[in-house]
Image (spheres, rainbow, N blue to C red):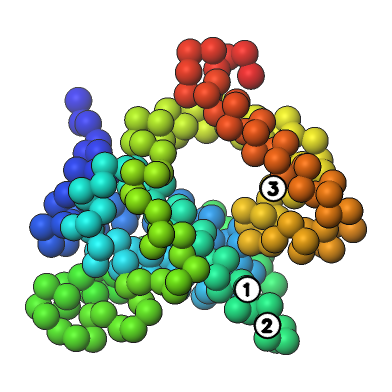
Amino acid sequence: MNTEVPAENLLARIARQDVDALSELYDRYAPRIYGLMLRIFSSREAAELVLREVFTRLWSESARLSQGGGSVVAWLVVTARDRAVEQLRAQRAIPPGVESPKSDDDHTERTGAVARKSKGLVVSAAVKAIAGKPEARKPGAAKAGPAVLMDQLPFTWLPQPKEISFLDERLVLLHKVIAQLPKSQREALELAVFGGLSESEIAVETGEPLGKVQRSLRAAITFVKHRRRAVCGTWAANI
């Protein structure tokens, strides 16, 4: 029986500068991270750039991260999301330019294709870093800006690998949980998570009073946290 190597074991190997382990981890999770980025950005180029930055940063910080004991998948998702939100906020300060619209028809095919395209650049950066070439670590590439949450929080703050494994196995149930949210709560949560909007910005976007937006977000987060225990526990079938 072919058992998949845990992501945390791959991270430990990456900390020892094992490029093959980085390549395997990238193959496993890059399409998922890229798909998340496409929900946040309208530009595939922006999504691809964040994808590369996150995995390059993982390589450069692997020694520290491997000692934390948290979930590698959670770190990748949170770091990518925070970096993407930082980029969105920077873009909002600039008048929007003309941009080709994103097509949903080829989303699945292009997600894998673009992730594979970026892999060579990430692995190349790792090889150059081992060789000691300075161009392997361009300013801002391996480490995101100060808005990235992971600079302030310990790795152990993230969900643990066992919990992430449960959520992966029961992803359909998790989506079902989110679908149970009232429309106003779900919309506020999505704007906060994928749009990076503040409570006041969500109020402007939705036309709802600020107080209602705040209550909607609190209720949505409380509900999802509570039902997450159901997804990870033995009574998940009751969802």
Residue under the image location 23 percent in, 80 percent down: 136
Q: Height in image: 137 above or below 227?
A: below
The residue to which callout 2 is attached is 93
The mark that comes first in sequence, 1 or 3, is: 1
Number of dots carrying numbers? 3
Which of these two is toward me, 105 or 30?
30
Position of residue 86 measured from the top left corner of the image (x, y, whole percent)? 55, 70
Whether residue 34 is visible here, answered yes or no, is no
Classify residue 3 as left or right of residue 112.
left
Query: Which quarter of the figure has residue 1?
Result: top left
Label 3, secondary structure: give it: helix
- What whole-number distance in Å separates the C-alpha atoms at marks 1 and 3? 17 Å
Marks 2/1 in contact by CB < 8 Å: the verdict is yes
Disc marking residue 162: none
The residue to which callout 3 is attached is 189
**Amino acid type at image mark 1:** Arg
Which of these two is toward me, 184 or 32?
184
Classify residue 70 as left or right of residue 201.
left
Position of residue 20 measured from the top left corner of the image (x, y, whole percent)? 16, 57
- What whole-number distance in Å separates the C-alpha atoms at marks 2 and 1? 7 Å
Classify residue 64 as left or right of residue 152.
left
Position of residue 222 measured from the top left corner of the image (x, y, whole percent)? 65, 33
Residue under the image location 44 percent in, 74 percent down: 145
**Amino acid type at image mark 2:** Ala
Residue under the image location 34 percent in, 43 percent down: 156
Position of residue 163 measured from the top left corner of the image (x, y, whole percent)? 40, 31
Query: Which quarter of the figure has residue 50?
Result: bottom left
Disc marking residue 89: 1
